[in-house]
Amino acid sequence: MTGINGEEVLRRLSSRLKMRHLILLLNIRQYGSLTRVAEQMASSQPAITSALAELESMFGAPLFDRSVRGMAPTALGKLVLARAQAMIHDLGHLVRDMESAVAGFDAHLHVGVIPFISGRLLSAAIRRAMPEDSKGLTVTIHEGTSDQLLPQLQDHTLDIVIGRASSTVDLAGVEFSLLYRQQPRLIASRRLAAQLGRVRLDWQQLVALDWILGAPNTPMREQVADIFLAAGVAPPSPIVESYSSKLIGEMIVASERAVSIVPADIAKELVRTAGLAIVPYSFDWTLPPIAMFTRAGAQSRPLLQFAEALRQLCADA
């Protein structure tokens, strides 16, 4: 990209860049072949080739390397693709905001949350973020791991992410603030919890029970494994792997042998909604804290209202 005249590139893009160019770029990245792109866009290959040449002339440099294996983005192409994806997502958000405005709402937010974030906390934040003089917000909740959600925040798919702050997440272009730390709780049916609570913690007895745990190679699963390893016992092999708190609750109350370790706030919700119990054992772990992530410089009023509501609720708790 050496020698690019920024002002000249900006002039060309401002006068010539169209949304179809952005869609073309994303299709090339997806299919890696101009022939397949032409098929997908109901066009001819010469027309697609010409459109790409026009686009690359706007930037003054190649956006893709061509080889027998297909087309791969150059360093400049990767940068342009990231912005193109964000612009396409922003256009979709504009349409959702328009729909919300017509229906009398302030805006629509896309909120990413990791598993085991309290539903009560989220619903309270949404309610508190709604001004008294309007219907407030409409919200779409997207679930996933921090590693899955933060790239979606960066490419503008999401407006805000509630996830775990750790040294492994990519924070490029992202701001974050810590919300709270979660403590571990062992949950079981009321009968089993009463039995376990009457005796001293026996790790060999505990590992032999029917465990419901999250997916391998996730922070929660690794923390549970560390708890057992620290006690000198091999981690349990789960009978079910799931982060669905509803499924965990249903399976535990239906069994006299099923147990799980979940964050304390989730355990309290399951006590209330599923009728299970918390075993009074104490465990230590170093699970990364829950944090709120937003794009750097994001200043929309509905987003700020939701973020402030979330911060205040966590501070009050």
Image (cartoon, rainbow, N blue to C red):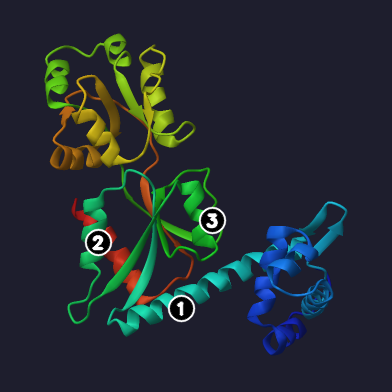
Choose top left, top right, bottom left or bottom right for residue 258: top left
Query: Could you tell me which residue is drawn at 63 percent across and 70 percent down?
Result: 84
- Residue 62 coordinates in the image, percent (x, y): 82, 68
In this orientation, does residue 215 appear? Answer: yes
Choose top left, top right, bottom left or bottom right for residue 4: bottom right
- Residue 132 coordinates in the image, percent (x, y): 17, 77
Residues at marks 1 and 2, CA–CA distance in whole angstroms? 23 Å
Q: Nearer the viewer, residue 170 or 30?
A: 30
Tag nearer the camera, 1 or 3: 1
Q: Amino acid at mark 1?
A: Leu
The disc label shown at residue 151, or none:
3
Of the image marks 3 and 2, the number of the one nearer the N terminus: 2
- Residue 64 coordinates in the image, percent (x, y): 80, 63
| Image label count | 3
Residues at marks 3 and 2, CA–CA distance in whole angstroms? 23 Å
- Judge from the rendering whether residue 17 lies leftward or rightward of residue 194; answer left or right: right
- Residue 98 coordinates in the image, percent (x, y): 39, 82
Q: Secondary structure at mark 2?
A: helix
| Residue tagged 2 | 125
**Disc 3 residue crowd, few under 14, some 14–19, many 20+, Cα 10 Å:** some
Tags 1 and 2 in contact by the CB under 8 Å rule? Answer: no
Of the image marks 1 and 3, the number of the one nearer the N terminus: 1
Q: Secondary structure at mark 1?
A: helix
Q: Amino acid at mark 3?
A: Pro
Of the image marks 1 and 2, the number of the one nearer the N terminus: 1
205 relative to 108, above or below: above
| Residue tagged 1 | 94
Choose top left, top right, bottom left or bottom right for residue 6: bottom right
Q: Secondary structure at mark 3?
A: helix
